[in-house]
Image (tube, rainbow, N blue to C red):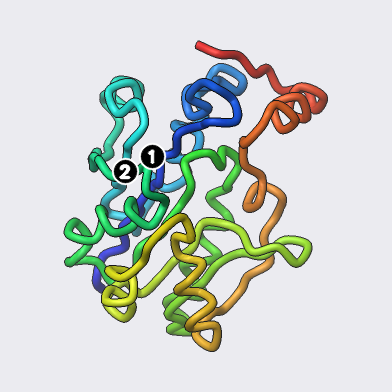
Amino acid sequence: MKPVYTVILAAGASRRLGYNKLLLKIDGETVIRRAIMPFLRPPIEKVFVVTGNAPDAIARELAGFPVEIISNRESAKGMSTSVRASLPFLVEAKGVFFQLGDKPFVTGEIIDGILDVFFTNKAPIVLPVFKGEKGHPVLIDIRRYVHDMELLEGDRGLREIIEKHSEDVLYIEGNEGNIFDIDSVEEINLLRERGYRVEKD
């Protein structure tokens, strides 16, 4: 079986908050670590983290973690540049998860469900959906779409691939963790209302 890799897209600028949201701590664990940990499981063989904004701070936070850092110096041009920056590292993979670094509540059960559909149904693109909203992570047959991915531009990321090849996509039922991300003070306040301890380092 060809290996499965994961790419964590962690190059965003966090402009709305004014500080690096990936270094926020939720119940003592940073957002970026919480986003990565569910992917540290078989059959996923490698986890790459694409950084752009504050790469040194992210690298320090992940010191000792079994991940490889990819530096994207063009991150200001949009998420597509992070996807493209990862491609040279993915040539050995069959399937690749793409996960956003600011999604700290994705579960291992969802990851296992996506993998099962990917291999059992031979589905080239699998992703979760919750209340009609497409979520993350996305698992994609990298070799099938690599040429399309090389042409991505701007901030659309994989949405363009998913829309262009909609007939290839299989969805599984996800949960709120697949669509919840941290983009503003409102999300942080919501977490606190739910009893989470959220603090800046």
Q: Image check: 115 left or right of 173? A: left
- Mark 1: few, some, or many residues within 10 Å (few <14, many ≥20)? many
Left or right of 38, for residue 107: right
Which residue, given by chain and number where applicable, does mark 2 sit on?
A: 50
Whole-percent x and y of residue 145?
33, 77
- In the depicted structure, whether residue 151 falls above or below residue 85: below
Please identify the residue farthest to the right as the structure is shown. 193
Residue drawn 31% across the image and 81% down it: 144
Percent x, y of residue 83: 34, 57
Residue drawn where x is 57% and y is 54% of the image: 109
Element type at mark 1: loop
Q: Could you give the CA–CA distance between mark 1 and mark 2, rounded to whole angstroms?
A: 6 Å
Q: Residues within 10 Å of mark 2 (few under 14, many from 20)?
A: many
The residue carrying mark 1 is: 11
Within the image, what quadrant is residue 1 found in? Answer: bottom left
- Amino acid at circle 1: Ala
